[in-house]
Image (cartoon, rainbow, N blue to C red):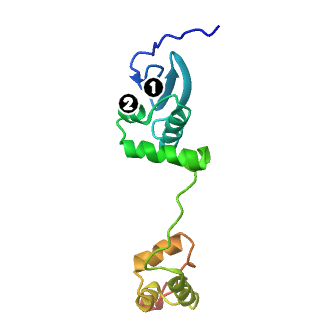
Amino acid sequence: MPQVQLPMFPAGSVEINRDLACRTEGEQVIYYNGHLPVFTHAKSDLASFRLFTSQLIVQGSATQGQVAKAFGVPLVAIKRGTKRYREQGAAGFFVPKPRREGTKLNAEKLEEARALLVQGHPLAVVSRQTGVLTDTLRKAIGAERLPAVKKTKGPTRGGMR
């Protein structure tokens, strides 16, 4: 025979609904079903928050409105998370966003800049010839999308080093 569990939550808990609550302890957020902890994640772990609240909604343990109200999150954000969970599952919350191609440094300009850099042209010259800002080229070099600029030794003063 199933036993009825009284909705008793630890002190300082935020009630999601009659059966669920959460509480922050230090840097951890702990979710409770009655007095039993059922899930925990770091306060800064937004992906885990979205995953767990979406699971609660899809399983029927909480409604989107209850989650939005309990955490002060816009309802549209809760709906997006729930949709992601239904379409992509748990993994959908932990994949990096796809990189978009830049508008200035597209594939064609990237190849042109690469060719000029390989020939040994300085960054300022490459920037002028391609029409791409020097900072944009530096970022592409830092991200290893372009080869590093080879520094040449300049003239020394008085012939001494």
* 53 relative to 148, above or below: above
- Rendered location of residue 52, percent (x, y): 53, 36
Compared across the picture, whether 91 is left or right of 24 comes to right
In percent of the image, x 50 and y 16: which residue is there?
Answer: 34
Determine whether label 1 and label 2 are within 8 Å by CB.
yes
Q: Mark 2 points at which residue?
A: 70
Q: Which circle marks residue 98 in the picture? A: none
Q: Which of 24 and 139 is in front in this view?
A: 24
- Rendered location of residue 85, percent (x, y): 55, 45
Q: Name the residue under label 1.
A: 22
Three-letter code, disc 1: Cys
Crowding at mark 1 (Cα within 10 Å: few <14, some 14-19, many 20+): many
3D distance between C-alphas at marks 1 and 2: 9 Å
Compared across the picture, whether 12 is left or right of 87 comes to left
- Rendered location of residue 151, percent (x, y): 52, 83
In percent of the image, x 43 and y 24: which residue is there?
Answer: 17
